[in-house]
Image: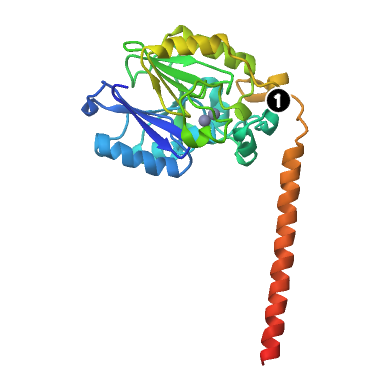
Amino acid sequence: MHGIRRVPVVFVNAYLVDVAADEPGRGWVLVDSGLPALGAATIVKAAAARYGGRPPRAIALTHGHFDHAGSAARLANLWKVPVLAHELELPYLTGQSDYPPPDPTVGGALAMMSRTFPHGSINLGDLVRPFDQDGTIAALPGWRVIHTPGHTAGHVSLFRESDGTLLAGDALATMNQDSWISNVTMERELRWPPAPLTTDWGAARSSVERLAALRPTAIAAGHGLPITGEAAASELERFAEQFTPPSDGRYVREPARTGERGVISLPPPVADPVGAAIRGGAIAAAVTGVVLTVGHQRRRSRRRFAAD
Ligand SMILES: [Zn+2]
Ligand SMILES: [Zn+2]
């Protein structure tokens, strides 16, 4: 991908985007900011290697989840640059509304892990402002903001029309996060957006169809390795045609309802026997640990007493 550097931060990608492809001296924009703290450290290092100490023109967020916006405040303060996001994402980036809680019952490896994910809002305060209404980005000429809701209400993807490069965020993934093995091998595959955090599956499908209509030549997402080449457009077209949401889950049955102030209403929670068992197991393990530790200390103190 010309003029774009992928910066992996554990399991999520951030992207350094040249304003003029392959001319790093002309400036750059950061797309997504990775996990809290770790994202900032990794991105600062990668940016220093490519742009010296030069700050970006702006930080553009595809959405506000913790793995994409986690280091936005730290980097915006460090570089003194604005953060841009879709206006429907602002409630979750200004402390007005928490995201709908993850759905651990939707199935797969990521859903299992999602029990530990934070879903609270991040408060960027005055650092964040909405993208321009006309879908262009003044700081990044030649790119278009495409509203791709479904994963979150104000999710956007970025598209460079001159060469068909798509930064899809979490509108889709280029790996199967639901498979434990694929989380290690990162095998390239078009997949639905990260399932436990996707709260409107009908909108998610429409968004994938919107992206397929762009016929991209390179697809770089928040999770996975980029898919590039002549087959990218036809693969995405086929994926959009065959897009099927997970078979069941809290937001599969009914979407979360959201508005310009954030969450309006949520579908009822789904029973989570696995989560209950894990919590029960954790409590049992903690109790066992305390009993064993106390027993051990008692035996030690008895021994010490006997030795005296
Ligand atoms: Zn996300
Ligand atoms: Zn993500």
In screen coordinates, is 68 left or right of 115? left
Amino acid beneath label 1: Gly
Residue 106 in the image: state x and y as whole percent: 67, 28
- In the displayed structure, 118 sits above or below 237; it is below
Considering depth in this image, is 120 or 274 the residue closer to the camera? 274
Tell me the quarter of the picture where residue 217 sits. Answer: top left
Tell me the quarter of the picture where residue 264 sits. Answer: top right
- In the displayed structure, 290 sits above or below 185; it is below
Position of the C terminus by quadrant: bottom right
Residue 155 in the image: state x and y as whole percent: 52, 21
Position of the N terminus by quadrant: top left
- Residue named by callout 1: 249
Label 1: few (<14), some or many (≥20) within 10 Å?
Answer: many
In screen coordinates, is 262 left or right of 169? right
Residue 70 in sight in this render? yes
Residue at image x 29%, y 24%? 3
Considering depth in this image, is 194 or 14 the residue closer to the camera? 194
Residue at image x 48%, y 42%? 36
Residue at image x 73%, y 39%? 274
- In the displayed structure, 8 sits above or below 264; it is below
* Farthest-out residue, bottom: 308
Residue 135 in sight in this render? no
Considering depth in this image, is 115 or 88 the residue closer to the camera? 115
Residue 253 in the image: state x and y as whole percent: 73, 19
